[in-house]
């Protein structure tokens, strides 16, 4: 079987694209698939690029992000015997269903619930912050998930949410963090990518804690960086390959990639490192137990985090 991954962003980003390529390599290693990655950077070329791969004998083709949806739908309709995995796209929604396309949507609400519960547990002031790179439905749901988690620990906790307006502006992130800290906030949660680097630096200067996103920045701030909300685009590709291999490929379905299927995660190794760096091993142990319990409860269905896409009132 031949499986292709066509990206509308360049590989080598040390981010989502490379993560998907790594997921594809896992498919090759675990399932024996012949795999290859392709780039389709220009929107006008997407359809021709996807069609060319389809005509080259591939059995399963992954495309990335919403800009590739029209091309994916068109070529899928031309090739009903092929399977398509549309990563982070919205094709089989609002009553629509393309039988040979499986598309996915990322939801981090439940994982941000853990971040919020962690922040509330560690806060001494009863005031925590959230710094977002942008204000879109996914991020809005994340901040609301964080608030639900925080209030599960401390119903009276005060939460301040701010939008940096960019995922690549550490200076803005630092300014927001310093302003939050000046108002008594002592734990800040982020969904801000590179902008979080400034949040971390501001937290170091102001003596606050950070629960970040995307990656582990413990080495940057060992006494201030507690953990992070992680997401795996590679897991999305792997799940598609796995269902294709076992004959359960969910064509025509729209799937949420979240805490239940490994698309999101809250790693506890950084928590343990933070505890060791600060001498707060008991607090770290509480957070590890909390994260494991919430993860189990979400997966079992005993805890449901409400999906809210309206920005919280300040």
Image: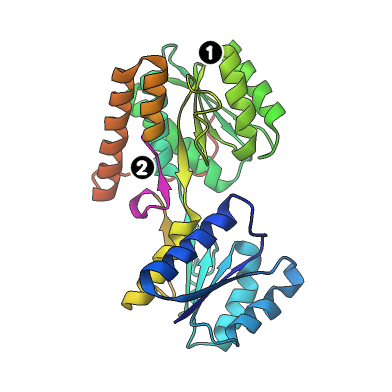
> In the rendered view, does 214 fall on the left or right side of 306?
right
**78 in relation to 138, above or below:** below
Identify the residue shown where x is 42% and y is 53%: 263
Label 2 packing within 10 angstroms: few (<14), some (14-19), many (20+): some
- SS for callout 1: loop
> In the rendered view, does 171 fall on the left or right side of 222?
right
Residue 217 lies within the magenta run: no
Q: Position of residue 169 (x, y in %)?
A: 70, 34
- SS for callout 2: loop
Q: Which residue is identified by label 2? A: 305
Q: CA distance from mark 1 to mark 2?
A: 31 Å
**What range of the chain is rendered magenta?**
259-268
Identify the residue shown where x is 51% and y is 33%: 212
Earlier along the polypeptide chain: callout 1 or callout 2? Answer: 1
Q: Tell me the quadrant of the picture where the C terminus can be found.
A: top right
The dot on residue 207 is 1
Q: Tell me the quadrant of the picture where the N terminus can be found.
A: bottom left
The picture quadrant where one finds residue 125 is: top left
């Amino acid at each position: 079987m031949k499986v292709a991954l066509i990206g509308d962003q360049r590989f080598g980003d040390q981010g989502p694209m490379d993560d998907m390529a790594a997921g594809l390599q896992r498919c090759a290693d675990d399932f024996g698939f012949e795999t290859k990655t392709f780039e389709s950077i220009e929107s006008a070329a997407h359809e021709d690029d996807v069609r060319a791969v389809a005509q080259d004998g591939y059995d399963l083709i992954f495309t990335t992000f919403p800009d590739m949806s029209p091309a994916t739908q068109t070529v899928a309709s031309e090739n009903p015997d092929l399977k398509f995995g549309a990563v982070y796209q919205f094709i089989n929604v609002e009553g629509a269903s393309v039988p040979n396309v499986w598309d996915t949507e990322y939801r981090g609400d439940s994982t941000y619930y853990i971040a919020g519960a962690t922040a509330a547990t560690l806060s001494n002031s009863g005031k925590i912050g959230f710094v977002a790179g942008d204000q879109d439905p996914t991020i809005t749901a994340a901040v609301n998930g964080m608030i639900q988690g925080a209030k599960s620990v401390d119903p009276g906790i005060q939460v301040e949410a701010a939008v940096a307006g960019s995922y690549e502006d550490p200076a803005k992130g630092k300014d927001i963090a310093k302003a939050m800290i000046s108002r008594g906030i002592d734990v800040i949660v982020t969904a801000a990518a590179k902008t979080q680097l400034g949040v971390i630096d501001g937290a170091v200067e102001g003596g606050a804690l950070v629960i970040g996103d995307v990656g582990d920045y413990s080495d940057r701030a060992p006494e201030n960086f507690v953990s992070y909300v992680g997401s795996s685009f590679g897991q999305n590709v792997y799940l598609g390959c796995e269902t294709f291999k076992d004959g359960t490929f969910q064509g025509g379905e729209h799937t949420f990639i979240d805490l239940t299927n490994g698309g999101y995660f809250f790693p506890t190794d950084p928590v343990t490192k933070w505890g060791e760096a600060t001498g707060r091993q008991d607090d770290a142990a509480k957070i590890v137990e909390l994260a494991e319990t919430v993860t189990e409860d979400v997966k079992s269905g005993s805890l449901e985090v409400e999906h809210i896409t309206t920005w919280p009132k300040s």
